[in-house]
Every structure is written in structure tokens, then in C-alpha cells.
Image: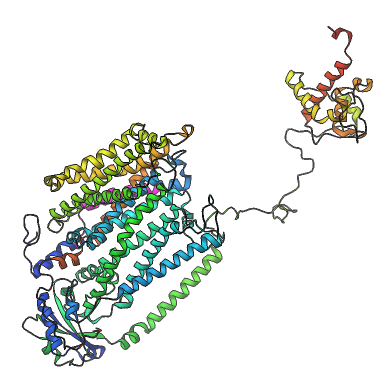
Amino acid sequence: MSQVITDRDGEFRHFDQATFAQVDDDIAAPMAYIPGRRWWIALACSGSLMLLGFSLMAYTVSTGVGVWGNNSPVFWAFPIVNFVFWIGIGHAGTLISAILFLFRQPWRNAIARFAEAMTIFAVMTAAMFPVIHMGRPWLAHWVFPYPNDMSIWVNFRSPLVWDVFAISTYFTVSLLFWYVGLIPDLAAMRERAATKVHRVVYSVLSCGWTGLNRHWRHYERTYLILAGLSTPLVVSVHTIVSFDFATSVIPGWHTTILPPYFVAGAVFSGFAMVLSVLIVVRRLFHLEHIVTMRHLDHMNKVVLATGLMVGYAYCIEIFTAWYSQEDAEIFMILNRITGPYWWAFVLMFSCNVLAPQVHWSSRARRSIPIMFTVSILVNIGMWFERFVIIVTSLHRDYLPGSWGMYKPTLVDLGILAGSFGLFFTLVLLFVRSLPVISMTEIKAGLPGAQISKHARVPAKLPAVEEANV
Amino acid sequence: MSEPEQERFEVVGAIAVYGAPDELAEGVLKAREAGFARLDTVSPYPLHGMDRLLGKGPSRLGYIAAAAGLTATIVAKTAQWWVSAVDYPLNIGGNPLFALPAFVPVTFEVMVLFASLTTVVAMLAVFNGLPRYGSALLRSSFIRDLTCNRYALVVDAADKRFGVDTILEDLSGPNVQAVELLQREKPSLYYKERILSVPFLVLIIGVAVFSSTATRLAFRYGGELPLYNFMKHQARVAAQAPSSFASSAGVTRAVEGTVARGFLPYAYRGRPDDAGANMVNTLPLTAGNLARGRDRFTVFCQPCHGRLADGRGTLTAAFPKAPTLHSKKVREWTDGRIYAVLTEGQNLMPGWEAQISRDDRWLIIHYLRVLQRSQHAPEQDLP
């Protein structure tokens, strides 16, 4: 279908105006026709899961959180496991769009938009969990400091309040970053619109963008500032999530390694999720020449690197427990590895630390089946990591008299499935309504797309004034 | 273009379309050398180096972002101090109310949020004047190409060198793929014809009238729809408030002759001899019952009547002496007669109906019989 000349890796080699048009055509193709049967089947599956999740949430809210398995001593069970899991998924998007942008990694252009969208959807999914975990979600606004007739304020020294600020800021800034990146593409989509409805929608969303150099000047600076602000933001968000645990006195939570450990784990799981979904999307929409093997190779390297960091954190936790010679710590780590939830630990360790080791081989990094399997395993492993941290630390703490076992109910499992349904429904709607790859950034990065001859500008020319058309 | 069409539109500029960034760069320099000053370029993506060709410095948005971030930092810190240390001081384990390190996360998040929002809004609205849907470029026949794979030089009609008749020729060149005049609807006509038109105004006023009427009616007839069930908002009547249910008050009086479930009222009030003749102690004589009777006796009777019911109680100083219960009269009384005294009182002793339950009174009588027998044991009781 593509007449573009590409090399062995699928990279562009020859460029002209037709190439530019081809890039736009290829990226806009999924929006140009009525989706096929496969898309509808996928939407039906994820939509049903989503509805299942929503109905079970309605059941929970109308009945009470007693329908979950949460009970003394494990009060933070599935809802918080899922919350931390989904928030972590989001981190890859910001890392790709902001940190790799600041490091001038042009390969990020092909995956940034998609990863950012996944950030937004993951944060939306994650944010549901603390809200339903409150038990009275209609009072969720009480977590914000606002003047009220009860004359009370939130406690700003509590990590749970920090969390509220971190998550809401993260969502808003991610959305802004994503939208700012979308504006020029929305303008291109406006000009390609087939129907009047499309044209009006894209037109409104693109704010009447025309691509004047004056606009680009401020636009690029905005993008740089947003990247600069998002980089510490993304690190702060999972750090603050880890503070929810680290500031407590529960053995297994009360450790200073938690913030970096959580951030590395978040990037790790996020990259795995981006890989899992992107591998499917690039194949379904024939975008192999834009999201090339080189991109996937780079992403697998990040998976390997962050997997090693996570593995280091697991090992140092065990070491610290021994080195501290603190009875409670030693018991916690032994209980985690050999206690009743030993299988969760084994699953976590093998999926997160052992599985990514295949990526030392470049053949594995460039093999779609292998990388897909590894990415799925990492997703599973990272979910279990949160399960291990939360459940094994809580179920046996200082007082043996209050020990207990946690078992999720069907409602718990249904809501977890529903969260995947919501996430994938949003992804499916996204791939059909907005360009999944930034046309602007891809075109700007093609060789020959920039000014090559840097002529000297004579000094005596009159100053250029604003052209107001 | 027909005559009225021409009156509707005005020329606001012109564009020259190029096929490659290098050709555009050349065109920009040529135009500047030719004396054009109100210039800009259009490209599908940012062209690096174009700012230099146009003699423009970097964007000043960074100052806006820095100012916004600084403002937010100060506001967030101050607000947290005021809330935590002044307006709502919560003592948590004796920790300081103004805890600077604990305020860092929220301060940072608020700074990022405010700086990002301000930067984006400033970029769009202040620096770029967006959203703007009336740009003449959007009406250009090349706008689609300009968002895809072509580049253009734009000259404003306000430029001193700009002439409607000459501009197209001025902009032409070997690399120029096309030249075009940019036209825009005259703003005066636009507002007069579109916004001040009768149908539009009628629509706006209609929507306003309809929505306010509908809201008013919904509140008037829709009833009160509480969003949340707060404990303080309950469907109840205060105890002494008038009630439509009963003629008196929120709490109604019991119907005349109502008795508590399981309790018949005492039938021999003021007639102790009838009580003695008709009432029988039906509670069985068991060790448990006697123990209970002894317990109640000790609490209620022993202070005045004494441990053995012989009238030698402990409350003797300020109290008139209570009689012994071993007198022949009391020993010969039936259980019912003693019950009447216990219930209604006698001489200085008040009635114990309110303090001692019905069954406990009967058990006290059982125990009293034991005491009486202990002090007046018949011959055969002796071992």
C-alpha cells in the first residue's frame, strides 16, 4: 500500500512532497473509513467489560464496600493495587513525550502521541479506584481543600492529600501536553475532513491553527516549557504515590527506597503496556514504516533497563531487611517470599526480573512474538508487584492476633476486568478519531524537511513586523 | 468575482506558495531585500532557522511561565500555612502545625499546574490570538497543502510595499509554485449580517427565556431533590413541634389505659388487705432465685432493716429506726400483703415500685421468709 521507499528497518530513505503526503495519508487512514469488523468486535469486547465494571461499581456503591474482599487487616486491597498499577502505566507516556523530548531523542516522535494518550486513559482509569474505595464516592470532593459550611480543611501534612494534588495535576498537565501536541495535527485533519461534521469538530478543536511562523515560535517554546515542567512532575507523581506507603510504619512499606523503586517500576510497566498495544495497532493500521523495528528495539532496551532497576530494588529490599537486623523487617521479607502469598512473589520476580533478560539479545528485541510475550508478562508481573507490596505487608504485621488472609471476591475481579475494558475502549475510540502518530513531528523530523542552506541575513534589512492576516 | 462579492470581501494580504523549505528561505530573504516588512511564513511544521531569517528573537513565553510558577509557589505555601496553622490547626501527634517539608509536594504540584495552564493559555490566546476562525489563510485555496507538504510566504496588505495590483507579480519567482490574494469577509458586514441578524437574536433570546423558565418551573414543581442524605437533614418532627399527624405535638400521648407489653398494672392500689388475700408468690424457690433475692435485699432493704431484717440497720444516725421484720404481725402476713407494702410503701417507707422490678420484689419476699425462719426456727429444724 505504501510507495514510500524504506530501508531494511523500515526507515524512510527518499524524500519529496509525495512522501509528506504519504505520511499524512497513512496516519490519517484509520479515520478515513468506516471501521471494519475486527474493530467492532474489539470494541464490543472491551465495551462489555467496561459496562460490567461500571455495573459492579454501581452495585458496590449501592450496597457498600462489604461486597469486596477488603477486611481487617487488609483494608487496602484490590482498589489500591489497581490504582497504583494504572497510575504506573501512565508514566511511560510522559517519559516518552517529555523526558525523551528534552534529551532530543527523535525516535520518540513516532510513539509519543500514542503513549501520551495512554497516559491520559490510564490516569482516568486509575482515578476511579480511590474514588470508589472511599465507599461514598458522592463525597469525593471532600478530598479537595475548599471553603465549606463545615469549616474544616484537609490536612496538608497527609500523603493522601498530596496524592490528590499529584494525580489531578498529572491528569491536567498530561491532557494539556497532549492537546498542545495535537493542535497542528487537528488543523491538518480539518483540511482533510470528508464530512461537514468532521470539519466542524476538527476546526473547533484546532482553534483555527494556520501554521504561521509566529505561531510556531510560541508553540515550540510552550512545548519545551511543558516538557520541562512534566519531567519533574512525572517523577513526583509516583514518588508521592509511594509516600502513601513509605510514610507509614508498616514493615514492607516503611522504606526510603520506595520512591525511586516506584518510579522505575512505573516506567517499566508503562513501556510494557505501550509496547503491547502499539504492536497490535501498528500492525492493524499498517504503520510498520512509521513505527519501525528501530523504535520497538529502543523501547525494549528501556524495558530491559527499567526491569533491571526494579530487580535491584527487589534485591535491596531483601538485603536491607537482613542488614537492619530488625525482627519485623526480617519477618516481613521471609513472609513475603515463603508465606502464604509466595506464589505472588515468584510471579512478580520471574515476570519482572527474569523475563526481560531475553532483551540482552538483539534478535529478541527485534522479534515481535518475543517482545509481545515479554510485554504481557511484564504487565502481569507489575500488577502482582503492587499486590505483593500491599497485601503481603498488611496481612501479617506486628500483632499475630490480628493476622488474616485476603481473598478477592468476584466483584473485585469484575471491577479489575472493567478497568481494562474502560482503558481499551478509550484506546479503541482514540485510534479511530485522532491521529495516533504526530504527523507534524514525523514530517518535521524527515531529512530534507528543514532549511539546509543557512544563508547570511544582511544586517541592513528593515525589521519584520507582525503580519496580521 | 461578481460585484457584490467584491464588496463583501477585502484583500488583507497575499501568499506565495513554495514546494521546499530551502526555496521558502530564499523567498523570504528576497522579499525582505525587496523592502517588504510585514511578513510571515506558513509551514506544516515548525521550520528551524526561520526565526533568524525573519529577524525574530526567541519567544518570551518563558517569563510568563516563570512568573506563573513563582506566583503559584507563594500562593500555595501561604494557603497551606494559613489553613494548617491559623484557620484549622490540627494537632497530630504534637507535630508542628507549619510543617515546611510536608508542604513541599502540594506546593510543587500547584506550581506545575498553574505554570502549565498559564503557559498554554498565554500561548494560544495572548501570543497567538487563538482561537481565531476568521483568518484569511483559512479561506485560501492552498490551506490544505500548507498543513501537509507546502510552504508559503505571507505578506500583509498593510505593508507599505503592498499594492493589490502589483503584489502577485512582486511575489512571483522561479521557485514559486503559486501566488494568491488573501481575502477576508469585512468584519463590519460580518457582525451586521450574522450576529445582529433578527433570526439569530430571536434564537438567543428564545433560548435564554426558555432555559430560565424551564429551570424556574423545575424548581417550583419538581420538588426538593436533595443530592445527599446528610444526617442533619431528616424527615422528622421535633418532639414538641406541632404535628399534622396528631392533634397535640410531634410526640403523641399514649391512649388512655395503655399498658406496657408484658406488664399488667398493679390492681390493688390502696387496698393492701385485698392484695394479701389475692396475690400469690408464683416464683419457684430455687437457690438462684434466693441468691437474687438476697442480693436485692442487701441493696434496698438491709441499710434500714439490717442484715437479718431485725431492724438494726446501718443507717441509724440520722434516720428513724426501721422496725424489725420478725414481728409476729409480719411473720403472719401473706406474701401478697408484704408485696403490697413493698410496692406502695408504709409509714415512713416509700413504695419501691419504681426501683425494684416486680419479680425482684417477689424474690426479696422469698429471702425475707428465709431470714424469718432463721430467727424463729421451729424445733424440728434444729439438727
- Magenta span of residues: A31-55
Relative to A375, does residue B268 appear above or below in the rendering? above
| Quarter of the figure that contains the N terminus of chain A | bottom left
The x, y position of residue B90, in whole percent, is 55, 55
For the point 79% across and 43% down, the residue is: B256
Q: Depth check: A48 or A282 in front?
A: A282
Q: Residue at x 43, y 74 (%)?
A: B207
Tell me, yes or no, whether the highlighted magenta stretch contains residue B26: no
Q: Position of residue B130 (x, y in %)?
A: 30, 76
Q: Nearer the viewer, residue B186 or B77?
A: B77
Give me the residue at 81% from left, 25% from top: B364
For the residue pair A35 and B145, the one nearer the viewer reads as B145
Q: Nearer the viewer, residue B118 or B132?
A: B118
Residue A349 relative to residue A394: left or right: left
For the rendered model, the colour scheme is rainbow
Q: Quadrant of residue B182?
A: bottom left
Asked where in the image residue B174 lies, by quadrant, the reply is bottom left
Indicate the position of residue B11 as horizontal and vertical percent values.
22, 88
Q: Residue at x 37, y 84 (%)?
A: B197
Magenta stretch holds residue A44: yes
Which of the image's four quarters has the C terminus of chain A?
bottom left
Above or below, B132 relative to B350: below
